[in-house]
Image (spheres, grey):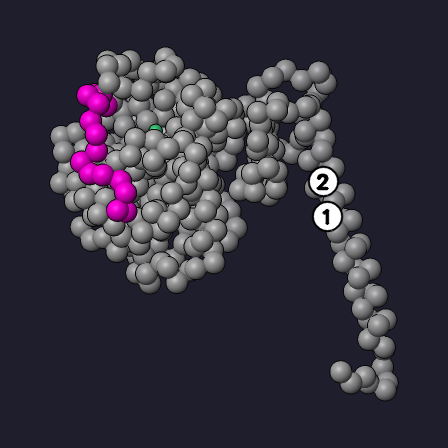
Amino acid sequence: MTKKGKGIPLWLVAIWAVNFLGLFALIVYLLFGQRDAAAHAQPLPDSAVAGVVPTQTAPANPAPTAFLPPTQYILPTVTSNPRSTLIVGTTPTPPSISIEVASRHQIVIGYSVEGRPLEVYRFGQGARERLIVADIHGGYEYNTADLADELINYLDEHPEAIPSDITLYILRSLNPDGYARAHDINGRANANGVDLNHNFPYQWKEDWNRDGCWSYLYLTGGTHPASEPETLALMSFISTHNFEALISYHSAAMGIFAGGLPPFRPSEDLAKTLSRASRAYQYPPLQTGCEYSGNLTDWASNVKGIPAVDIELRNHRDTDFDINLRVLDAFLAWQR
Ligand SMILES: [Zn+2]
C-alpha cells in the first residue's frame, strides 16, 4: 500500500466515486422505480407471490394506463420467491408466442394467462439440447418448482456438471398462476381452470373419463387443443429447438411414466435409465387405470419424436434433491 506523493489523493478519488455511484443509483431509481410504483398502484392479492399484471380487474383510477410504457418489459424482483420476476405491461392478453428476450442464461418464452413470465434457464453450450419442465400442475405440485430452483442454483455453482456437448434448459414453472394461487389442489389448474397436462394437441379431449385419474376438482382440457398460452409458449419453444430428451416433473406418485400412446420405445428406455439411477422412483410406475389425453410427454413422444418422461416426486413437500441430482447426471449422459 504505497501512496503517491503527487497527483490527486486516493481518498478524494474514492469520495468522488461514491458520489458518482450514488447519483447514478438515484437516476436509475427515478427513471424506473417511479414507473414501477405507479404501475402497481393497485393492491395485489395476497396470493400473488410474484408480481402480476394489473389488467384483469377494473382499477379504481379511471385512466390507469396513461402512465404505462407502450411495451411490455421485465424487471427483476426479489419477493418471497427469489426466482420470480415482476412484469409490467399494457397487453390484457399476453403474447403466447416464444419471445426469447433475457439476459445471461435466463429466457422468457412466453406468459401465463395472468401475465406471469415463463422462465427458462440455460446451462452449457453444447449442440445437444435437453429440456426439464417443472410445475406443469402449479401450486398443487409446487415442490417441483422448488426442485427446479435448487437445480438451477446448483448448476450456477457447478457449471462443470454439464457435459461440454450438452445444453440443458430448465423451465422452472409452466404454471406460475397455479403456483401463486394456492399450494394445494386449488393451485393445480391454470387461471382458466384448465389442467395444462390435458391441453396438448395429441389425443386431446375437453373432458375425459375420470376413473383412476386425478379428480379432486373438475378441471377441463381447455376449449380446444393448445388453447392455453402456457401450452402454446412451451410448444413454440420446443419447436424452435432440437431437444433429444425431456423430463416433466410432477408430485406425487412415486414412479416414472414413459411418454407415448402407443408406447414410444426411446421414452421407455429413458424412463428405465432414470429409474435405475434414481434408486427411488420405480419404473414401470403404479398404474391407476387413468386414460391420459392431451399430455405433454405423449405429445412430445408421438408428435415431436422427443423421448420424454414424467417423473413423480415422492410427496407434495420434499424436493428429493439428492435423488434428482443422480437423475440429472443420468439424464445428461443418456444416449438414445
Ligand atoms: Zn402432476
Q: Residues within 10 Å of mark 2 (few under 14, many from 20)?
A: some
Residue, disc 2: 33
- Quadrant housing the N terminus: bottom right
Q: Main secondary structure of the magenta part?
A: loop
Per the rendering, the mark at residue 28 is 1
Q: Secondary structure at mark 2?
A: helix
Please name the amino acid that badge 1 sits on.
Val
Per the rendering, the mark at residue 138 is none
Residue 113: image location, x then y, percent: 48, 25
Image quarter for ligand 1 equals: top left
Residue 2: image location, x then y, percent: 78, 85
Task: Specify whether residue 281 is painted magenta.
Answer: yes
Please name the amino acid that badge 2 sits on.
Gly
| Viewer-proximal residue among 120 and 24 | 120
Question: Which portion, as a residue range, is magenta?
Answer: 278-292
Which residue is at 40% across, 31% downward?
316
